[in-house]
Amino acid sequence: MAHDAPQATGPSKLVIRNIGLLLSGALEKPILDADTIVADNGRITAIGRAGDVDTAGATTIVDANGTTVAPGLIDSHVHPVAGDWTPRQNQIGWIDSFLHGGVTTMISAGEVHMPGRPRDVVGLKAMAIFAQRAFWTLRPGGVKVHAGAPVIECEMVEDDFKELAAAGVKLLGEVGLGGVKDGPTARKMVAWARKYGIQSTIHTGGPSIPGSGLIDKDVVLEADTDVVGHINGGHTALPDDQIRCICEGCRRGLELVHNGNERSALFTLRTAKEMGDLARIILGTDAPAGSGVQPLGILRMISMLSSLGEIPAEIAFCFATGNTARMRQLDCGLIEVGRAADFVILDKAQHSPGKTILESVQLGDLPGVGMTIIDGIVRTQRSRNTPPADRVPEIVGP
Ligand SMILES: [Zn+2]
């Protein structure tokens, strides 16, 4: 079982050298011309060619051996409950398994699988504050889990949102999973949340499990959440004409999830591409779910959207990194000076017919993860979950 990961104890300096391909996470320039990254005390301080950056005094040196470095992947839609255990499929260590799939940050869309989840206002607020605190303190494997996402109920008043925000809650769980399922009430509460700096998302599509309900395009557009949660359904998607209406009828984030309808994900992607709106596409798994827990879910979404959606792989990586970081106001997700030193190091899987990692992903194969780094600290080496890569990075010093 994964335990609370160690934090840095003193000043640290990480150098990653011999990078073969550097993916930035930024749509406007997805590939950077650099082979070295330096991070001091968990923050990126230099990106460049080996001769041009100051690598002296490193406390950790990673030789990338010509592999690919990308920002650590962000899963925009998970349902954590307690530590690294999920009651949904009664599994222990699922977050650590996601780390082996390159995920370094997760965002809760509500702790809805909590057995006996309270639905009264005091109870749901208490649970959200508890989850926010607990996951901020415990980082399974080092993974940053942004949790504490209350599911709104009709009895809530503006002061409840003010109180939640003052207590450190920054997210709403999926609107529609609680008692609020109508547009006008959702709109009013989402606006209250926004007023106090709380970001919102909504369950889009048919019911996910017995007890949840349909949220159609009219409710989605009226609620006006910051993110259109699983626009490709979780699992049941809205009809294509409704998905198009949502894409065209708002400027909010369009979230595609693994535990959704893949055809609808591709339809959304094509629609966003036609509109010149790829910056709105972000990725999640919606795990744990009825279909299980998918440690490689984000890599699978990148590969599926790149291969079947005919998107260059370096762009598809942005959907799971820079796009999400910008939309969610996270300090990670981009290879940029000042950002958190959260990385995934990958290479082409052995025997993939692609000539390069990008070509292999565009052919529908998954890359192999060779290392993950969070806050400048190496968290895992060769992944236990991905197919083995051609080449792997190594820790070579100081
Ligand atoms: Zn949902």
Image (spheres, rainbow, N blue to C red):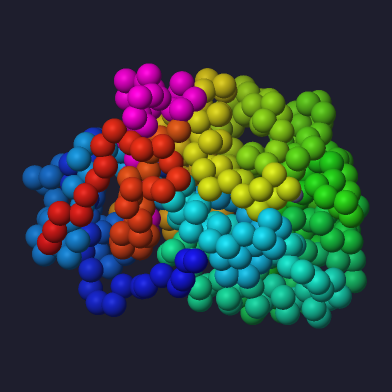
Q: Quadrant of residue 273?
A: top right
Vertical arrangement, residue 131 with respect to residue 30, above or below: below
Left or right of 100 on screen, residue 84? right
**Count of labels in the image:** 0
Q: Position of residue 385 (x, y in %)?
A: 45, 45
Which residue sits at x=39%, y=48%? Answer: 383
Vertical arrangement, residue 173 with respect to residue 334, above or below: below
Q: Quadrant of residue 148?
A: bottom right
Which residue sits at x=61%, y=65%? Answer: 85
The answer to if 128 sits in the magenta stretch is no
Q: Is residue 291 visible?
A: yes
Q: Quadrant of the C terminus?
A: bottom left
Vertical arrangement, residue 359 with respect to residue 236, above or below: above
Which residue sits at x=37%, y=43%? Answer: 369
Q: Is residue 157 visible?
A: no
State the residue in front, 342 or 326. 342
